[in-house]
Image (cartoon, rainbow, N blue to C red):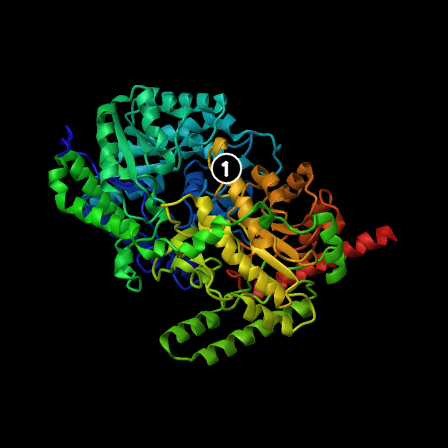
Amino acid sequence: MTAKPAAAAARATVYGYPRQGQNRELKRAVEGYWKGRVTADALRQTAADLRRSNWQQLADAGITEVPTGDFSYYDHVLDTSVMVGAVPERHRAAVEADALDGFFAMARGTQDVAPLEMTKWFDTNYHYLVPELGPDTVFTADSTKQVAELTEALALGHAARPVLVGPVTYLLLAKPAPGVAADFQPLTLLDRLLPVYAQVLADLHAAGAEWVQLDEPALVQDRTPADLNAAARAYRELGALPDRPKLLVASYFDRLGDALQVLAAAPVEGLALDFTEGAAANLADLAAVGGLPGKRLVAGVVNGRNIWINDFQKSLTTLGTLLGLADRVDVAASCSLLHVPLDANAERDIDPQIRRWLAFARQKTTEITTLARGLAQGTDAITAELAANRADLASRAGSAITHDPAVRARTAAVTDADGRRSQPYAQRTVAQRAHLGLPLLPTTTIGSFPQTNELRTARADLRAGRIDTAGYEERIKDEIREVLSFQEKTGIDVLVHGEPERNDMVQYFAEQLTGYLATQHGWVQSYGTRYVRPPVLAGDISRPEPMTVRWTSYAQSQTTKPVKGMLTGPVTMLAWSFVRDDQPLGDTARQVALALRDEVGDLEAAGTSVIQVDEPALRETLPLRAADHAGYLAWATESFRLTTSGVRPDTQIHTHMCYAEFGDIVRAIDDLDADVISLEAARSHMQVADELAEHGYPREAGPGVWDIHSPRIPSAQEAAALLRKGLRAIPAERLWVNPDCGLKTRGWTETRASLENLVAAAHEVRADLTAGGS
């Protein structure tokens, strides 16, 4: 059956595009600037070249309206803070002295001034800089960046649409500034913020913007009546402005729910909605509110967060239904393509049969334009593309990599008993303390130590054949011995081997498990200049042989102190991969958990007494709607327990989490039944310790006292002050001392000094506690 063409030619567009460049040019330029090797002008030129290249790639693919303003040197929420003048007082002098250096100071901090807090962008692995606001915050408009980038695109001949974080989402993402009462609600500043947005919109209109996109993803979360009233007021006022471009209010990552009625009734010209798997309810909800008569609908039918090819026939069916619900329907990805790599065709090491299943940013833009053409001209216009798409989908569905009968039989045989320790924590902890003999306030690190240029060179030399395996392994042994020696001299109580052999905490394991595919060029921004290559979880998972036992055992053979075995947990293995979309996530998590369970058992059998299974993604993967939380947390916590529950009572299980809102999942943290948890706490000023105490968390915890995502070195006094603050919430016999996160991204100079200060702080507070109890 041939689909009827749309009444008007559908536009093809995207909400944002990867920033880094084909070879991570932006990362190299920014880090070069920090080190003084790249001038500010050279950095700006690199940024301009990347923007120009991105817009041209989009235009060449057939995208008829390119986004501007989505590019950032570090983070688009921080850009928004600059745009509205929400610069923390402690950073004002730096920003006024040099806007670029001040921008980076807010992001990274300096030796004397702490950076903004960093946390996850909704349920993604992208991190944003949290705005700090208070009752005294004064907003001022600075549209310089937004106008400049629009002007660039227009001068190059592109139809361009500026993209801004919307005012409601901006305030809902913010936190009370230091010193402001914790119950302060930033949304109360809306009336103060709206005139600033009005000025920015006027500036963009004057610069030639026909449309401006205002992103309001916070509205897909559960929102209070007050939140919805604020959204209604915001868009009623912005819509009534006399001097403005047309407004496209965008949402993504989930269904809008009650907020859809609010936005549909607002005096704006268009809405952008997510119509992919997790937000499919938007279709029914849109029909229920009577559609969007007289408005533009941008339909996100291509998944902007995952890397599997689109099902063209399914998307065209959705688009055809939407034609009757809006004045015009345009085609887009479900969210910014910031969350996927740039180009699947660069992956020459992946089997071509499998590569045809993959769509990175460039491939997704082609999918969008194909669907837009099919919508506008009818399916006869894309007959060849539809046939190729059907063949690619069938290839994946029928592949042996996606179905391993042995893995599926083992997963089906799992019982509730497999996910429970043999003794409760109160009994285990007695056995563990006797076995490990650790002091009060034991010190440790999270796992990784600095990944030096020498280590990266060694891995590159091995891949290139410049050294053989034996030579590479000698370099790894040298590094492990150096890391252990430093920790012993510093006085750390529970050691790590430093992970010199690991390229990434997920990729390292993915490369050794069946069912995973590793990319060579699939870089995705995590934060700032930190890029990761998420592996592709393509099929059923199993562990052919031990993955970590050899190096952990080697490290333990070099010291009498306990050395932690280090693994990445099943939820994080899913969250930081591009996960398969052809079966429930809980089923995939159990497969990964069983593979990791085998590794935990082998580590214990080899003499490892402390095993850490990191789950930093547990909170970030929490669904955005509360109604979906229980189902997710049930399989997420079960998969962790399935990984760790087969050990003896005297084997101590640790886990680690960082950069998330832990208060939302404290009960789930308890349900993990780990013996010790380490958590990010330095930037949030020990907030998590209070949250654990409020919940009555009964186990041991290490809220971090060193913010490792900043280059500054905390003093022993600063670490001790944080430690004492933690002691007000967690008893000393259950409190550990550690950094916020792994040290992979830090240099040795700051690592040595910071860890020495951390240990000194622990000794100082330990001595005070001992003296006080004597």
**At which x and y percent is residue 656?**
58, 52
Viewer-proximal residue, 187 or 155? 187
Single out the residue that lies furthest toward the left: 380
Sort mark 1 into few (<14), some (14-19) or many (20+) by Cα contacts within 10 Å.
few
Kind of residue at disc 1 = Gly
Relative to 714, say whether 122 is above or below.
above
- Split into 4 quadrants, where in the image is the N terminus? top left
**Residue furthest right as drawn:** 774
Which residue has dot 1 on it?
A: 631
Image position of 95 (left or right of 692): left
Number of marks drawn: 1
Percent x, y of residue 597: 55, 57
Q: Position of residue 321 (x, y in %)?
A: 24, 28
Quick check: can you spot residue 217? yes
Position of 477 relative to 578 (above/below):
below
440 on left or right of 505: right
